[in-house]
C-alpha cells in the first residue's frame, strides 16, 4: 500500500474531467448525416445541452436531469425540501453536485438544490456515473453532476495588431419570457430569465437571473368545527435566482470572483389525507454563496486550479394543522455555513502520463431548532491520480488514491482512511469503447444525518414521515464496480450498455422505527451490509433533421437482515425507469417538434409493510421556431399532455395525480427568447 501511495503522489494525475469549455459531442459530416461520437473520457460521461433542456420544457437542473434514464430525480412536488437525485441506487449524500467544479452549498433538510438552479444560467450539464471519490470525496460514491455556467467570451487572445474595432468592449445576452396555464387553475404561471455578458481585452462579467412564479391551486373544504378552510392542493411556488461572475483573463491564467443568491418559497398540502387534510406546510429558504477561483498556467505541461468559497443557507418551515379546535402551528428555523477550499495541480510530463495532485478542506457548521447548540465538522483530504495512455491511446489506465482525515471536534472521534481507485478504458477501434472502474468509497456521517430532524410530509401514507438524526452513526465503507460498452454503428447511431455493483458496509439509511404512527417515525441507522446493483441501456441517433434517444435503467438494492439471515429490499429506490425523446425539424417552415416521455415503476417506501407508491408516467411536447438568424425564438409546449394517465396504483389505491401533487393536470406554456 505504501508503495502504491508513493507512486500515485509522484505521478500526480488525471486528465482534467471538467473543462470550462463545452466539448462538441458531434461532428458534422454532410447535409444528410451527422457523425455519432464516442465519449473520450475514461469514465462514461453524459452531457445535457442548453437546447436539449429548453426543448424538454426544463426550467431547472432537476427538470433537465429527468431526461437521463440512469438518473432518478424525486418526482414529488419540487422544492419542498424533499428533492433528491439517485445514481446507481445511491441517493442524496452520494451524488456530488457542483457548479463549475465547486460543490453546491449544504441543504439542511437533506434535499439537493437542483430545483433552485435555472437552466438559463447553464451552458451544459455533465454527468459521470460510478464512484469518483478519489477526486471528489465520499459525496461522489454514486456519481458526479457538474453544472457548467455560461461565461462571457474573453478577448485576451487577440494580438496587438488587430483592429481597434475588434478590441472594443463586447456586450451580449438574452431574455426569456414564458407564460403557462392549466385549465384547472385560475391565473397565469410566469417564468422570466435574463443574462448579460460584457467582455473586454482582459476582463469579463456574466450576470444571470430568473424568477419563477406559480400561484398553485387553492381548494376550499368545510370543517364541522373550523368552518371554511382554504389550502393549497397543488404547490404555490416562488423561486428567484441571481448569479454574477467577474473574471480577469491573461496569458498567465485567470481569476474569477463570483456570488449567487437564491430564494425559494413554497406552500403545499401538509398530509394529503386524514382529518387534518386542510393543513399546510410552508418552506422558505435563502441560499448565498461567495467565492474566488483562480488558474495559474506555468506552461503547456503544468497548471494549477484553486478556489475558496463560503456558503450560507437558511431554512424556515412551518406546519399549520387545520383541524377545528385542534388547529396548531409549529415553526422551525435552521441555518448552515460552510467554507471550502480546494487546490489542484495538473501536470503532463510526457505523452503517456496526465497527472493531478490536490488538497481539499471543508469546514461545516449547522444550527437551528433541532440542535442544542451549533454543530461543527471538519474534513480534509489529499488525493492523487494519473491517466496513463498506452498503445497510441487505445488503452488508458487511471490509478488514484485519496487520504481522508477528520480531526476530533465536539467529542467526535479521529477519522483517517485511504481509498484507492482504478479506471480502465480500451478503444480497439474509433467506434468502440470498453470501460471498467473500481473505486473504494468512505463516507463520514454528515451533520444532517447525525442531528437533523426532517419532516417529509409531501405525500400520503408511508410518504408522510419524520426522519430523526443519530449521533452514534459510524462511517461507511464501500466498493464500487462499473462496466460499460459503447458502440458506434455505421455512423448512424450509438448505443451503450453498462452495469454496476456496490457493496457497502455500515450503510447509513433511514430505517422505520415505528410504522404505525402518523406520521411514520424513521431514524438514520447503520445497516451492517447492503448492496446496490443494476444496469442501463441507451441508444441515440442524429440525422440532418431528426434526433432520437431512448433509454432504460434497472436498479436493485438490498440489505442483510441479521435476525432473519436474509437479504431484504432497501426502500426509496426506483427499480425500473424508461426515458425517450425525439425531435424533427420540418423542411421549408424550419419548425422543430420535440416529444419526451418518462416512466418510473412504483417505488418501495416501507419494506416491512411492502408499501409502494403508484408508478409515474409523464409525456410532453414542444414546438419551436427561430427567426432573424436565430436571434429570436418562440415556442409552445404541453406538459403532462396525457393528463396523469398511468398504469399502477399505490398500495392504498393512490393515483399519480394526488400522490405526486400533479393536480394542475395538462399544462400549456407559451414563451419567447431573444438573444442580442
Image: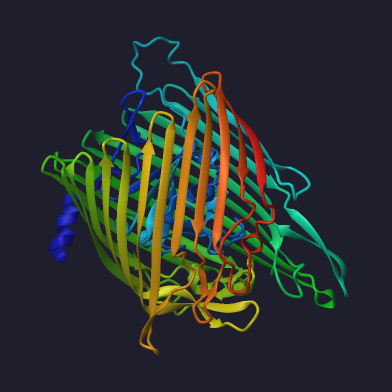
Q: Is residue 296 left or right of residue 154?
A: left
Where, by quadrant of the figure, is residue 458 drawn? Answer: bottom right
Q: Which of the pair 162/48 is nearer the observer?
A: 48
Q: Quadrant of the N terminus?
A: bottom left
Q: Where does the image place residue 92, in percent across and percent down from the top left?
A: 47, 62
Is residue 204 depicted above or below 460 in this figure?
above
Residue 534: image quadrant is bottom left
Residue at (85, 77) in percent of width and height:
325
Q: Quadrant of residue 248?
A: top left
Compared across the picture, whether 210 is left or right of 584 comes to right
Residue depicted at x 53% and y 34%: 593
Q: Is residue 301 above or below residue 106?
A: above
Q: Position of residue 39 (x, y in %)?
A: 29, 42
Q: Is residue 59 visible?
A: no
Q: Is residue 198 visible?
A: yes
Q: Pick the residue in front: 411 or 655.
A: 655
Q: Residue at x 37, y 84 (%)?
A: 566
Residue 470, x across and y down, in percent: 49, 77
Reply above or below: 447 against 485: below
How many numbered marks appear? 0
Amino acid at each position: 500500500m505504501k508503495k502504491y501511495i508513493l507512486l500515485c503522489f509522484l505521478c500526480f494525475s488525471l486528465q482534467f474531467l471538467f473543462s470550462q469549455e463545452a466539448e462538441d459531442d458531434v461532428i458534422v459530416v454532410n447535409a444528410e448525416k451527422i457523425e455519432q461520437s464516442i465519449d473520450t473520457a475514461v469514465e462514461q460521461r453524459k452531457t445535457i445541452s442548453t437546447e436539449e433542456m429548453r426543448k424538454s420544457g426544463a426550467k431547472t437542473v432537476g427538470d433537465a436531469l429527468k431526461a437521463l434514464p440512469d438518473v432518478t430525480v424525486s418526482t414529488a412536488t419540487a422544492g419542498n425540501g424533499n428533492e433528491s437525485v439517485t445514481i446507481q441506487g445511491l441517493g442524496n449524500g452520494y451524488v456530488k453536485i457542483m457548479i463549475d467544479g465547486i460543490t453546491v452549498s449544504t441543504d439542511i433538510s437533506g434535499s439537493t438544490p437542483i430545483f433552485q438552479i435555472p437552466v438559463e444560467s447553464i451552458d451544459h450539464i455533465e454527468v459521470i456515473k460510478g464512484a469518483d471519490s478519489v477526486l471528489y470525496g465520499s459525496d461522489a460514491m454514486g456519481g458526479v453532476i457538474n453544472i457548467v455556467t455560461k461565461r462571457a467570451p474573453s478577448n485576451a487572445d487577440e494580438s496587438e495588431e488587430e483592429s481597434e474595432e475588434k478590441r472594443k468592449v463586447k456586450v451580449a445576452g438574452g431574455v426569456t419570457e414564458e407564460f403557462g396555464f392549466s385549465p384547472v387553475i385560475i391565473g397565469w404561471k410566469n417564468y422570466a430569465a435574463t443574462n448579460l455578458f460584457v467582455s473586454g481585452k482582459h476582463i469579463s462579467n456574466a450576470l444571470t437571473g430568473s424568477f419563477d412564479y406559480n400561484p398553485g391551486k387553492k381548494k376550499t373544504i368545510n370543517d364541522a368545527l373550523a368552518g371554511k378552510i382554504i389550502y393549497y392542493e397543488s404547490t404555490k411556488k416562488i423561486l428567484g435566482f441571481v448569479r454574477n461572475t467577474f473574471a480577469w483573463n491573461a496569458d498567465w491564467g485567470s481569476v474569477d470572483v463570483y456570488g449567487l443568491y437564491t430564494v425559494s418559497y413554497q406552500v403545499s398540502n401538509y398530509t394529503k389525507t386524514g382529518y387534518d387534510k386542510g393543513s399546510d406546510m410552508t418552506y422558505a429558504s435563502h441560499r448565498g454563496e461567495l467565492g474566488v477561483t483562480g488558474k495559474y498556467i506555468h506552461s503547456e505541461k503544468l497548471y494549477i486550479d484553486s478556489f475558496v468559497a463560503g456558503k450560507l443557507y437558511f431554512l424556515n418551515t412551518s406546519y399549520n394543522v387545520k383541524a377545528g379546535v385542534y388547529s396548531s402551528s409549529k415553526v422551525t428555523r435552521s441555518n448552515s455555513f460552510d467554507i471550502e477550499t480546494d487546490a489542484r495541480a495538473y501536470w503532463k510530463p510526457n505523452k503517456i502520463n496526465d497527472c493531478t495532485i490536490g488538497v481539499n478542506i471543508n469546514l461545516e457548521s449547522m444550527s437551528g431548532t433541532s440542535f442544542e447548540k451549533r454543530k461543527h465538522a471538519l474534513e480534509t483530504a489529499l488525493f492523487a491520480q494519473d491517466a496513463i495512455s498506452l498503445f497510441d491511446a487505445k488503452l488508458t489506465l487511471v490509478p488514484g488514491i485519496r487520504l481522508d482525515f477528520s480531526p476530533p471536534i465536539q467529542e467526535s472521534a479521529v477519522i483517517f482512511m485511504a481509498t484507492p481507485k482504478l479506471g480502465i478504458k480500451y478503444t480497439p477501434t474509433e467506434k468502440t469503447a470498453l470501460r471498467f472502474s473500481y473505486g473504494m468509497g468512505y463516507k463520514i456521517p454528515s451533520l444532517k444525518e447525525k442531528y437533523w430532524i426532517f419532516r417529509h410530509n409531501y405525500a400520503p401514507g408511508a410518504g408522510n414521515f419524520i426522519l430523526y438524526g443519530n449521533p452514534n452513526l459510524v462511517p461507511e465503507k464501500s466498493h464500487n464496480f462499473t462496466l460499460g460498452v459503447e458502440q458506434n454503428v455505421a455512423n448512424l447511431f450509438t448505443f451503450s450498455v453498462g452495469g454496476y455493483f456496490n457493496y457497502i458496509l455500515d450503510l447509513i439509511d433511514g430505517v422505520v422505527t415505528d410504522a404505525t404512527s402518523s406520521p411514520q417515525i424513521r431514524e438514520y441507522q447503520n445497516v451492517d451490509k447492503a448492496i446496490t446493483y443494476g444496469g442501463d441501456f441507451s441508444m441515440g441517433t442524429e440525422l440532418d433533421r431528426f434526433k432520437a434517444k431512448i433509454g432504460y435503467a434497472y436498479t436493485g438494492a438490498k440489505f442483510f437482515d441479521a435476525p432473519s439471515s436474509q437479504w431484504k429490499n432497501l426502500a426509496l429506490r426506483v427499480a425500473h425507469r424508461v426515458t425517450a425523446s425525439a425531435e424533427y425539424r420540418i423542411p421549408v417552415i424550419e419548425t422543430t417538434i420535440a416529444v419526451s416521455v418518462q416512466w418510473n415503476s412504483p417505488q418501495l417506501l416501507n419494506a416491512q409493510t411492502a408499501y409502494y407508491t403508484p408508478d409515474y408516467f409523464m409525456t410532453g411536447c414542444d414546438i419551436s421556431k427561430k427567426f432573424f438568424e436565430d436571434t429570436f425564438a418562440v415556442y409552445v409546449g404541453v406538459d403532462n399532455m396525457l393528463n396523469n394517465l398511468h398504469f399502477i396504483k399505490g398500495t392504498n389505491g393512490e393515483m399519480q395525480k394526488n400522490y405526486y401533487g400533479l393536480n394542475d393536470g395538462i399544462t400549456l406554456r407559451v414563451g419567447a427568447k431573444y438573444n442580442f
